[in-house]
Image: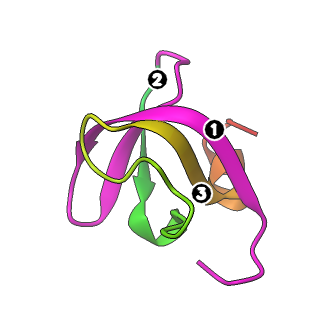
């Protein structure tokens, strides 16, 4: 992510992970794959499978997934 990119924060659970993405459930019944390149590493509480907490990603990907 770019340093000045707007962020989106949501409570979420990681359902699965791959080398390039996390499967994130925000409680809407439709988990979405989020590319690791769109995840904010420094502020994120959800980074591996079965973790729950504040998930921080780019506002752009949140809009693409209809979260924002």
Counting residues from the start of the chain, the first of labels 1 and 3 encountered is 1
Tell me the tag on residue 39: none
Q: Nearer the viewer, residue 8 or 20?
A: 8
Which quadrant of the rendered structure holds the C terminus?
top right
- The residue located at (65%, 83%) in the rendering is 2
Instruction: Say few, some or many: other residues with alpha carbon within 10 Å of mark 2 (under 14 / 14 to 19 / 20 or more).
Output: few
Circles 3 and 2: CB atoms closer than 8 Å = no
Instruction: Say few, some or many: other residues with alpha carbon within 10 Å of mark 1 (under 14 / 14 to 19 / 20 or more).
Output: some
Q: Is residue 26 magenta?
A: yes
Secondary-structure class at tag 3: strand
Give the Cα separation between the discs numbered 1 and 3.
9 Å
Residue at numbered disc 2: 30
Secondary-structure class at tag 2: loop
Q: Residue furthest bottom?
A: 3
Residue at numbered disc 3: 57
Instruction: Say few, some or many: other residues with alpha carbon within 10 Å of mark 3 (under 14 / 14 to 19 / 20 or more).
Output: many
Up-down relation of residue 26 to residue 43 (above or below): above
Q: Nearer the viewer, mark 3 or mark 2?
A: 3
Q: Position of residue 23 (x, y in %)?
A: 35, 42
- The residue located at (46%, 23%) in the rendering is 30
In the shown orientation, is residue 13 left or right of residue 39? left
Q: Position of residue 13 (x, y in %)?
A: 40, 32
Tell me the tag on residue 10: 1
Counting residues from the start of the chain, the first of labels 1 and 2 encountered is 1
Give the Cα separation between the discs numbered 1 and 2.
14 Å
Q: Nearer the viewer, mark 1 or mark 2?
A: 1
Magenta stretch bounds: 1-29
What's the image's color scheme?
Answer: rainbow
Counting residues from the start of the chain, the first of labels 3 and 2 encountered is 2
Q: Nearer the viewer, residue 24 or 56?
A: 56
């Amino acid at each position: 992510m770019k340093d000045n990119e707007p962020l989106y924060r949501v409570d979420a659970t990681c359902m699965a992970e791959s080398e390039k993405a996390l499967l994130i459930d925000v409680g809407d019944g439709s988990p979405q794959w989020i590319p690791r390149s769109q995840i904010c590493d420094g502020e994120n509480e959800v980074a591996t499978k079965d973790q729950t907490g504040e998930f921080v990603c780019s506002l752009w990907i949140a809009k693409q997934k209809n979260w924002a």
